[in-house]
Image (spheres, rainbow, N blue to C red):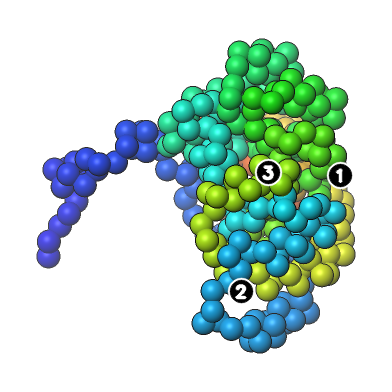
Amino acid sequence: MTSLNSPADAAGVLGGVRAEVRATPDYPFIPVHAPVKLDQNESALDFPRHLRELAVRRMLERDWNRYPDLHADTLREKIGAYEDWDAAGVVVTPGSNVIIKLLTELGGIGQRILTVQPNFSVYELEGQMLGASLTRVPLRADFGLDVAAMKRELAAGGPGVLFLPQPHAPTGFLDEESDVRAVVEAAGDDWIVVIDEAYHQYSGSDYRSLVLERGNRLSLRTFSKAWGLAGLRLGYALTHPALAANLQKLVSAFNVNVLTQVVAEVALEHPAYVRERADEVIWERERVQSGLSGLKNLHALPSRTNFFLVRTPDPSAAYAFLLERGLLVRRQDKQPMLAGCLRVSIGTREQNDALVSALLELDRELEVRE
C-alpha cells in the first residue's frame, strides 16, 4: 500500500499553501462522546416534534432536483419580516461562522481586525489565515470592555473589521449598553462594526437599533442556539442594504440548501417556542448558579448566556472528574485570563441536577485534600 505520510511528501503537498494558513492552528475542538453533552453551547432541547413533522412534510413537497434560491431570497424575506428588517439588508449563510470568514475577507485582508481577548476563536483564526493585521484588546478583570483601550486602538486607525460579541463568548459577560455604544461610535466610518449577538435571546439585549444608526454596522445572529437548530448550520447578518450587497458578493451561490431553508421557514412561522425555551434556559441557569453558590474551592462565574464558566484549581483533573461521571464540558484554561476555567452549557433539568451534584462532590473532595 502506498503511503503519503512521509515528511518529504508533506513538504511537497504544502509547497503552494500560504504561510498564514500553515501557521494557523486547527479549530480547537476534538469530539468526545459522553452521556451528557454540555460542551458546545447548544440547546439541550431539540426542534419541537410537531414542527419537525411539518418540516418533513414540506420537504417532501419540494423539488430536490432543482437548485435552491440563489441567495436564500425567500428565507431572507422571512427573516426580515421576523426581525422587522429590510430583507435587502439580510445576508444568510450556513452558520454565522461563515459570515465571520466573509467579513474578514470583506474588510480584513490587507487591513485590520480588532477584537477583545479572550474571544471567540473564529475571529482570530480567520484573521490569521487571511493575513489580516490582528489586534486583541484584553478585557477588564471583570470581563467587561476596556472602553478606553478600545478607543485608543480605533483611533490608531483603520480601515478594518471590529468584532464585539454581546453577550461575550466564552465568558458569558454582557456589557453595559453605554460601553458598547461608546466603542461603536468611536469606530466612526473606517471600520465594519460587527456586534455578534449569537446569545442575545438569553441576555435580553438587542442592538438592532444601534446598527440602524450607521451603515457600516452589522448584527450577527444564528439559528444554532436558542432556535435549537445547530444541526442545520444557519446564520444571518442584519445590516444596511449597501453593506449587505457587498458582503453578498462573497457568498457562494445557492449556499443554503432547500432542506435547510424549509426547516428555517417553519421555525420562523412558529417562533413562540424560542422565547419559551430561552426563558427555560435562563431559569435553569439561575437555578444552577444558585445551587453552586456555596462552593469553596471552585467558583461558578455569573453569565448572561446559555453557558457559564467554572474556575477550578486544576482544570485537567476537574474535566476528567466530570467526564468519569458522564458529563462532558469544555476546557477554556488555555485562553488568556481564563486560567483554571471550564465552560459548561446549560442542559435539561436532570442534566443540570447531575452537574450540580458532581461539582459539589468535587468541591468536597478538594476540601478534604486541603
> Closer to us: mark 3 or mark 2?
3
Q: Quadrant of the C terminus?
A: top right
Q: Which residue is mark 2?
A: 259
**Relative to the observer, which residue lies in front, 237 or 43?**
237
Amino acid type shown at disc 1:
Gly
User: Residue 292 appears at what percent x and percent y?
Assistant: 79, 40
User: Residue 349 appears at what percent x and percent y?
Assistant: 79, 59
Which residue sits at x=53%, y=44%?
101
**Relative to the observer, which residue lies in front, 14 or 365?**
14
- 149 lies above or below 190: above
- Real-space CA distance between mark 1 and mark 2, rounded to the nearest whole angstrom: 30 Å
> Closer to us: mark 3 or mark 1?
3
Q: Which residue is mark 3?
A: 242
Amino acid type shown at disc 2:
Leu
- 10 Å crowding of disc 2: few (<14), some (14-19), many (20+): some
- 10 Å crowding of disc 1: few (<14), some (14-19), many (20+): few
- 10 Å crowding of disc 3: few (<14), some (14-19), many (20+): few
